[in-house]
Image (cartoon, rainbow, N blue to C red):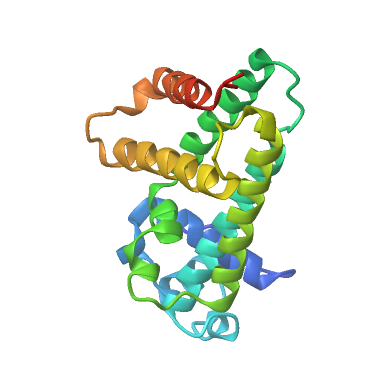
Amino acid sequence: MASHSPYHHGDLRSALLQEANVMLKESGIDGLSLRQLAERVGVSRMAPYHHFKDKHDLLCALATEGFRELDRLIERASPQASSTKELQATLAGFVRDYLRFAIDNPDRYELMFGRPIWKSANPSSELKETAFACFRHYAERISTLLGQQRLPKGSKPLRLAQASWATLHGLCRLMIDGIYVNQTDMEEVSHEAVRLMLTVLAPTS
């Protein structure tokens, strides 16, 4: 594939990350290198090293940007849901957006949650801070959206957030890997996931 237009001015780090995301989508993690990245952006081979000390550092930066994008997605999930119907619509929209976020960029999603970074126990401090802040935001948004009165007796908002995110993550992995769930089934699967959440979380009174 032909290289993109050479870099001329502005924020080189952002330009490198943008092109690295394109390369990641095209060739996966193994196809990404700082040398090829420099060539595609149109800068010297050493220029990327002023921003990323090595490939691992670049991968951590890509994962960090992924969590920032996910955090914006969480922010768009409006906490204003005065009825079960509105709650269902909000949750359905968020579930669809989350699944689309993952399956449109499977290699980036793997960087964010998978083995390449976390298994080695070597995420950057920026990545850890951003990832954990994203989860805290998710937990707060879920708690606000559902409201304490909707939680079954004895349920804890943190555990609810962990369990619901685990459900979403599991669906993403099944779709990305093509195991039992096809991407063409996303709309129907999203609906069933929301229905299950609402059934479990419905007020008991």
Q: Where is residue 98 drawn, in percent x and y? A: 52, 38
Q: Where is residue 204 drawn, in percent x and y? A: 57, 21
At x 48%, y 54%, the residue is: 22
Given residues 6 and 204, the one toward you in this image is 204
At x 58%, y 54%, the residue is: 135
Given residues 24 and 45, the one toward you in this image is 24
Direction from residue 81 to residue 183 in the image, left or right: left
Check the image and name the residue furthest to the top.
Answer: 85
At x 57%, y 45%, the residue is: 156
Direction from residue 102 to residue 175 in the image, left or right: left
Query: Is 90 drawn above or below residue 34 in the view shown?
Result: above
Query: Is 49 drawn above or below residue 181 in the view shown?
Result: below
Check the image and name the residue furthest to the left.
Answer: 179
Q: Where is residue 99 drawn, in percent x and y? A: 46, 35
Picture quadrant where residue 127 is located: bottom right
Picture quadrant where residue 15 is located: bottom right
At x 45%, y 43%, the residue is: 163
Q: Inspect this view and state whether residue 124 appears.
A: yes
Q: Where is residue 24 drawn, in percent x and y? A: 41, 57
Query: Is 117 drawn above or below residue 70 in the view shown?
Result: below
Number of disc labels: 0
Given residues 1 and 19, the one toward you in this image is 19
